[in-house]
Image (cartoon, rainbow, N blue to C red):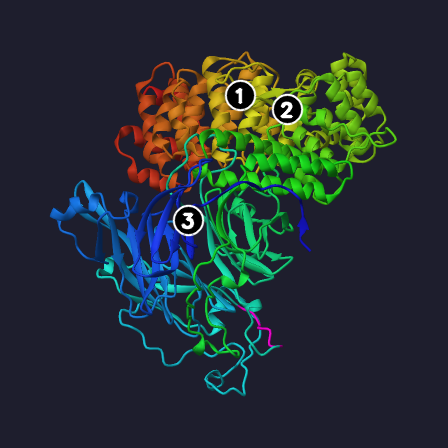
């Protein structure tokens, strides 16, 4: 049963001053109402609160059977009857008709207008006649593009709206018959059309299809009229022969069916397309996608097709993309983009609302308290008329559209009442003799007549149940107009005014703690949301008022979900966020004492505060509110207290109060470590260093690292987007830097902090600017290499470390603190740090470096270069500040060239700068394919330098001996002799021969030095 609220959605009403009893009427955009009576159509001006006034009138060809207005193109389409023949006409430029006797231009659809006649069309109404091969039964205008769809017995004809360009300054509206949709086995009584979506309805069937515009996803359009000889069989297995039975002895009775999505193509209703456009390039639709087929079962108790089981009020309702309700944009795009589409149709006692865009889904079922005659769907309401009542129901269109528009709905950021929420009736208003209804803007048009038997019937009731073959639509001639009728314009009140009434109504449920409060406030929220989605109908002042109401409704819903103990209590968080309320304002609203005076805090409020404090908001609570939060969590969620106290929003909490509540906690497992660290941090705020040290000593360092991983805000906090080290982090920097680095590394391993955040943290902690690197940060980088973090880009980390090592070596700058690891520690613990080559130790032994820290940086750099993972080419451009004039710089440059296999250049450099290192270098580097450099490069160079003499003559001679010994021990004598040329090489060979025979005289070496 639908819940009824006695609200007042309807405002003032006025009588339309019609001269004749209306037969058809419809809204005309924002400011007009069309009423057809007899062979005339009257247009009335409807603007705001002003009285409805006649605007113009024009004659029709005959009695109007169907009327439809299109805002796109601003035209009126009508099916008219004269002498038992029906005609389809469109009335364009009707606003130019001042008087009934004004001239009117009548032209055939597609008729090309010559330029000299353009002045004729500027200021007069035109009637476009659209001939059809079959009698038109119903029409529908696309609200987006203005195309006109016409329903006939076996087909639908689409007239595309277009403009004929007469000159550069003038164009006229026209149509082109672009498509015929052939339909078998169903005769449309009502149709609805919207941007390619077609809904058609017979007495007991509804079919919804989509005309696809992508030629790649379906078959091509047939360009010749299709003659269908073999229609599909019905899904229930009724054969074609059975359908053709025409005997009075049989009653055809089919089962109710509902087919959704692709299954609806199995309904047996054949739908094919025939393009009739003159230009192939103008083809809009290529194939059909079936979306929904629904058939209802008739009531056969009386063996007569009763009006009680006939469908009525088919309607497609589009909702357009216009931006979020909380958007700050002042101007929204005027171009309509379809966001969501809904289809409504109704039986006399029940109505159905479907969503049909991305998926076909039944949203709501409306049970009417009495038999309905007609209904009209709006984004905010469903208005239904019975013989004596105007009923107003809520709808879920805005709830479904909100989820299509915003992907953050149904998250912790945003929320919206569910589509599945039960609908309700806001009002049942007494109206005697209701016959018809239509809606436009914020107006409802109602036709009443005292005599219920005087309305024109839609068709003759058959004497028995008929198959589709015999359901041709026939219009009955209405009786002569009688007195006792009225056409009313009923204004709906503004959404904000109705919203306020709904909020006031909901206050009666607050103390009862029932779902009714949430339900009514959700209805109020959806009402405001729907009004904001239709922003094109709003004035600037109205939009601002609606935005304020939207935020207020979110606050009310947040209060409900935080106060009531329901399974949806977590929704308090997104609703409070959408309300724009600060945490302090929410806490001020959260005083709900029980009847006995005690205080109880429900899980919705606790969830909101816990989540808000965890988000590192910039808001700082006062000391009183912070104490209130601690008290709330002590009562409801005591295990969350350590996390709550670490929030930046709790900065103003009295540390004595915090310590008292922490002391009451039951410490066990990891909670014990977290409580210990929180107590240590609070003790620092109290200035109690002894208690701080005792707390830090109560657990080993590895367990303390686990505690920091559980709550990173013990070390790092963010305020206004800036990283702020805590007092505990500052204390650890001075007392336990190893624990601090290990904790930050643990945070990185567990994805609690990013690489850039960690770098910024240490720079801020050590008081360094962006370009200065503190040693603690270098310690962290070295620890990252040792730990092998998966998220750390290895070469980027190498670059950071080598850049820092090179900068210190070039500036002779020692680290600001003692490094946590030596080069030996890193070589033993990390595979990326390699053993330093022996010849490097020989090279640097010639230089006495006083600063041990300087030596450590050099050893770490050399070890990285000697490691297997280092990309040497990437660091060459950054070696420029490290001069080769120093032994440190020379060792790094030679190491890099060696890794790049530039051995000959390295040999020349070492012979020039450090001859004593050349033989260790050659022994380590000149192996395998590089072995020939011993006699091709090194031996000739040594011999030449020995011959030249000089201060380093003895060093060269010693190296030459080492070279000759290598050749002897490696049995490379033949290779040596093969390349020996000149007296120096011959003497060297003699020396080698004497060495092999065991005769070696030092003085002979002296003589050879002067050779």
Query: Considering depth in this image, is 331 or 1004 the residue closer to the camera?
Result: 331
Q: In this view, does 301 lie above or below 984?
A: below
Q: Residue under circle 1?
A: 857
Q: Which quarter of the picture shows residue 500? A: top right
Q: Which circle, 3 or 1, is nearer the viewer?
A: 3
Residue 814 visible? The answer is yes
Which is nearer the N-term, disc 3 or disc 1? Answer: 3
Q: What stretch is highlighted in magenta?
A: 295-301
Residue at 37 percent across and 62 percent down: it is 217
The residues bearing labels 2 and 1 have C-alpha atoms spaced at a distance of 29 Å
Q: Residue 593's spot in the image, x, y percent?
A: 81, 29
Q: Which numbered tag is attached to residue 716?
A: 2
Q: Which quarter of the picture shows residue 697? A: top right
Residue 115 relative to residue 214: left or right: left
Residue 658 relative to residue 793: left or right: right
Residue at 48 percent across and 78 percent down: it is 467
Crowd tier of the residue under label 1, counting other residues whose Cα lies within 10 Å: few below 14, some 14–19, many 20 or above: many
- Residue 694 drawn in magenta: no
The residues bearing labels 3 and 1 have C-alpha atoms spaced at a distance of 98 Å
Placement of the N terminus among the 4 image quadrants: bottom right
Residue 840 relative to residue 57: left or right: right
Residue 175 visible? The answer is no
Report the predominant secondary structure element of the magenta stretch. Answer: loop
Q: In this view, does 984 lie above or below 560?
A: above
Q: Residue under circle 3?
A: 18
Which is nearer the N-term, disc 2 or disc 1? Answer: 2
Q: Residue 339's spot in the image, x, y percent?
A: 46, 47
Asked if the residue at tag 2 contacts the one at tag 3, i.e. Cβ–Cβ closer than 8 Å, the answer is no
């Amino acid at each position: 049963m639908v819940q009824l609220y006695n609200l007042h959605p309807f405002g003032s009403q006025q009588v339309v001053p019609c001269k004749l009893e209306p037969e058809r009427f419809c809204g005309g955009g924002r400011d007009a109402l069309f009423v057809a009576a007899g062979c005339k159509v009257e247009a009335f001006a409807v603007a705001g609160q002003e009285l409805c006034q006649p605007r113009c009138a024009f004659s029709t060809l005959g009695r109007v059977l169907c009327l439809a207005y299109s805002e796109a193109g601003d035209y009126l389409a009508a099916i008219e009857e004269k002498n038992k023949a029906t005609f389809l006409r469109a009335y364009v430029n009707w606003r130019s008709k001042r008087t009934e006797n004004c001239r009117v231009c009548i032209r055939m659809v597609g008729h090309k207008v010559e330029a000299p006649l353009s002045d004729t069309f500027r200021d007069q109404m035109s009637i476009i006649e659209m001939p059809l091969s079959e009698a038109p039964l119903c029409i529908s205008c696309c609200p987006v593009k203005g195309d006109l769809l016409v329903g006939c017995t076996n087909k639908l004809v689409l007239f595309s709206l277009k403009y004929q360009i007469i000159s550069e300054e003038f164009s006229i509206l026209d149509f082109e018959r672009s498509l015929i949709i052939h339909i078998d086995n169903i005769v449309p009584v009502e149709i609805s059309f919207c941007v390619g979506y077609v809904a058609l309805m017979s007495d007991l069937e509804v079919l919804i299809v989509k005309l696809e515009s992508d030629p790649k996803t379906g078959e091509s359009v047939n360009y010749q009229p299709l003659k269908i000889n073999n229609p599909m069989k019905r899904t229930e297995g009724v054969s074609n022969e059975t359908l053709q039975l025409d005997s009075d002895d049989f009653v055809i009775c089919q089962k109710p069916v509902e087919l959704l999505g692709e299954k609806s193509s199995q309904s047996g209703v054949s739908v094919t397309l025939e393009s009739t456009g003159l230009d192939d390039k103008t083809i809009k639709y290529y194939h059909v996608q079936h979306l929904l087929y629904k058939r209802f079962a008739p009531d056969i108790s009386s063996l007569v097709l009763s009006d009680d089981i006939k469908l009525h009020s088919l309607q497609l309702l589009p909702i357009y993309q216009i931006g979020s309700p909380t958007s700050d944009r002042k101007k929204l795009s005027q171009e309509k983009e379809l966001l969501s589409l809904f289809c409504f149709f109704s039986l006399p006692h029940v109505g159905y609302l479907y969503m049909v865009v991305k998926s076909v889904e039944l949203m709501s079922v409306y049970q009417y308290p009495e038999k309905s005659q007609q209904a009209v769907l709006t984004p905010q309401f469903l208005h239904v008329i019975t013989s004596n009542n105007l009923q107003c129901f809520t709808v879920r269109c805005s709830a479904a559209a909100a989820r299509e528009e915003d992907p953050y709905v149904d998250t912790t950021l945003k929320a919206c009442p569910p589509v599945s929420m039960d609908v309700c009736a806001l009002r049942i208003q007494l109206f005697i003799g209701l016959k018809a209804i239509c809606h436009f803007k914020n107006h409802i048009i109602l036709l009443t007549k005292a005599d219920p038997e005087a309305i024109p019937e839609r068709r003759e009731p058959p004497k028995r149940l008929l198959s589709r073959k015999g359901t041709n639509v026939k219009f009955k001639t209405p009786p002569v107009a009688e007195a006792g009728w009225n056409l009313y314009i009923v204004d709906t009140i503004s959404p904000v005014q109705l919203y306020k009434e709904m909020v006031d109504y909901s206050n009666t449920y607050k103390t009862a703690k029932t779902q009714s409060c949430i339900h009514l406030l959700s209805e109020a929220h959806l009402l405001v949301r729907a009004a904001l989605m239709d922003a094109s109908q709003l004035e600037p002042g109205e939009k601002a008022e609606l935005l304020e109401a939207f935020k207020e409704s979110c606050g009310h819903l947040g209060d409900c979900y935080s106060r009531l103990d329901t399974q949806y209590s977590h929704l308090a968080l997104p609703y409070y966020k959408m309300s724009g309320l600060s945490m302090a304002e929410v806490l001020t609203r959260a005083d709900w004492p029980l009847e006995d005076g005690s205080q109880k805090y429900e899980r919705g409020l606790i969830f909101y505060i816990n989540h808000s404090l965890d988000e590192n908001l910039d808001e700082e609570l006062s000391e009183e509110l912070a104490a209130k939060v601690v008290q709330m969590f002590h009562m409801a969620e005591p295990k969350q207290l350590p996390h709550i106290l670490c929030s930046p929003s709790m900065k103003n909490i009295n540390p004595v109060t915090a310590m008292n509540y922490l002391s009451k906690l039951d410490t066990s497992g990891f909670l014990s470590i977290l409580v210990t660290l929180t107590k240590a941090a609070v003790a620092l705020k109290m200035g109690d260093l002894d208690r701080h040290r005792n707390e830090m000593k109560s657990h080993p360092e590895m367990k303390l690292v686990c505690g920091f991983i559980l709550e990173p805000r013990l070390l790092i906090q963010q305020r206004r987007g800036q990283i702020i080290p805590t007092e505990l982090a500052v204390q650890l920097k001075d007392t336990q830097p190893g624990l601090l680095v290990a904790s930050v590394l643990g945070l990185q391993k567990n994805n609690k902090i990013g690489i850039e955040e960690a770098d910024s943290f240490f720079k801020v902690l050590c008081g360094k600017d962006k370009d200065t690197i503190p040693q603690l940060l270098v310690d962290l980088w070295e620890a990252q290499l040792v730990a092998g973090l998966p998220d750390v880009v290895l070469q980027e980390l190498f670059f950071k470390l080598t850049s820092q090592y090179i900068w210190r070596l070039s500036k002779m700058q020692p680290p600001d603190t003692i490094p946590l690891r030596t080069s030996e520690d890193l070589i033993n613990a990390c595979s990326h740090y390699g053993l330093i080559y022996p010849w490097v130790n020989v090279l640097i032994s010639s230089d006495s470096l006083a600063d041990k820290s300087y030596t450590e940086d050099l050893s770490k750099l050399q070890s990285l270069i000697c490691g297997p993972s280092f990309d040497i080419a990437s660091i060459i451009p950054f070696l420029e500040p490290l001069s080769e004039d120093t032994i440190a710089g020379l060792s790094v440059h030679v190491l890099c060239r060696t890794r790049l296999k530039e051995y000959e250049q390295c040999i020349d450099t070492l012979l020039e700068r450090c001859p004593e290192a050349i033989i260790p270098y050659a022994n380590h580097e000149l192996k395998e394919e590089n072995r020939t450099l011993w006699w091709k490069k090194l031996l000739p160079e040594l011999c030449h330098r020995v011959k030249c003499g000089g201060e380093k003559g003895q060093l060269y001679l010693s190296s030459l001996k080492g070279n000759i010994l290598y050749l002897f021990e490696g049995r490379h004598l033949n290779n040596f002799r093969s390349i020996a040329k000149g007296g120096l090489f011959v003497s060297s060979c003699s020396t080698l021969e004497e060495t092999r025979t065991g005769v070696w005289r030092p003085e002979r070496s002296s003589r050879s030095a002067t050779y």
